Amino acid sequence: MPPNIIDPPIQADPEFAAAKPAISHAIPDNVVEENDNLKIFQSSLSLIAHILIGVVTGISILFSLRNGLPIGATPLHIILCVIGYQLLMAQAIIILSSESGWSSRLKLVHKRRIHWIVQIVGSVLAIVGSFIKILDKNIHWNTYHGQFALVAMVFTAVSLVNGLTSLYAYELRKFLPSNLSKLSHICFGTVAFAASSISLCYGFDKSFFINWATLEFTYTIIAFTAAFTFIIIINPFITFYRKSRSIITS
Ligand code: HEM
């Protein structure tokens, strides 16, 4: 550095300096609270789940469009079912349980509203996708894929009706204990989502998918589906356990 140039002292930002109290009790950035560790863990799991959902949905759509447009009944049922169950229904569950990600700043009332809107759209797409394939077939429920899809469909339909009773739990409390309708909604929704993921795994296990994707990649994509399904259903399980325990002990 030339001798006539002196290093200017670092000036404090006047706005920041004015806002800062004389003695700061704030926790330094390098101190990680115990609570932060849990948040970091939850955020990481949520991020991993989102990435895996994106990969599985993307691969399913890519596979369905492999022969270009127009597409037949089978590819159409795959696109609608995967978007309905694995993309939208998963997001509808995540938004209620997640303290992290894009929805973390929303109020609970707004999260609930988004939950039921996304849930209705997802369920309609999934049920339409399922019916497209049912109408395309002559013999029904003769495969594990179809049987788990049927379980997913029935529980999705029940969960939709039951979701309404949970939404109006307070108004309907004279006819239906509000906790009962909420607990059953968590239960039906989780079973529907898990069954749809099992059905999807059996769908990936079909020879025409394996021929396109190779066996190794098929197993990878099945493992991805299992992993994000597990991550997503952890929270409803915890909520179910907490709610039922509080009912039993109260
Ligand atoms: C969450 C995703 C999926 C759902 C909910 C679903 C749902 C269904 C349903 C309801 C049926 C009719 C079952 C019957 O009437 O017996 C069906 C059949 C079929 N699906 Fe899917 N499907 C999904 C994903 C896939 C995928 C990813 C593939 C292939 C890559 C696939 C391939 C087939 C085939 C080939 C059939 C006819 C044979 C059978 O019933 O097993 N599906 N699916």
Image (spheres, rainbow, N blue to C red):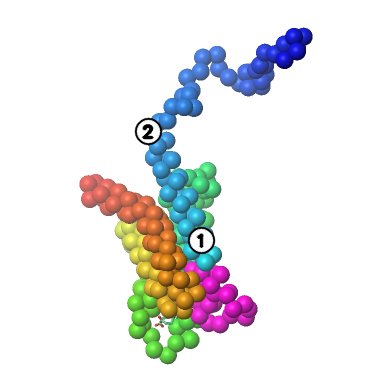
Q: Is residue 72 left or right of residue 131?
A: right
Number of the label disc, if any, that sits on residue 248:
none
Most foreground residue, 141 or 189? 141
Q: Residues within 10 Å of mark 2 (few under 14, many from 20)?
A: few
Q: Which residues are magenta?
A: 60-83
Mark 2 vs mark 1: in front: 1
User: In this orientation, does residue 191 appear?
Assistant: yes
Q: Magenta stretch: residue 153 in it? A: no
Most foreground residue, 191 or 232? 232
Picture quadrant of residue 94: bottom left
Residue pictured at 39% horizontal, 54% vertical: 231
| Ligand 1 sits in quadrant | bottom left
Task: Say what secondary structure mark 1 lies in.
Answer: helix
Q: Looking at the image, is 231 positioned above or below residue 197?
A: above
Number of the label disc, if any, that sits on residue 55:
1
Residue pictured at 39% horizontal, 62% vertical: 223
Q: Are marks 2 and 1 in contact (CB under 8 Å)?
A: no
Residue pictured at 61% horizontal, 21% vertical: 19
Tell which residue pokes out farthest to the front in this image: 2
Rendering coords of residue 86 (x, y %): 46, 64
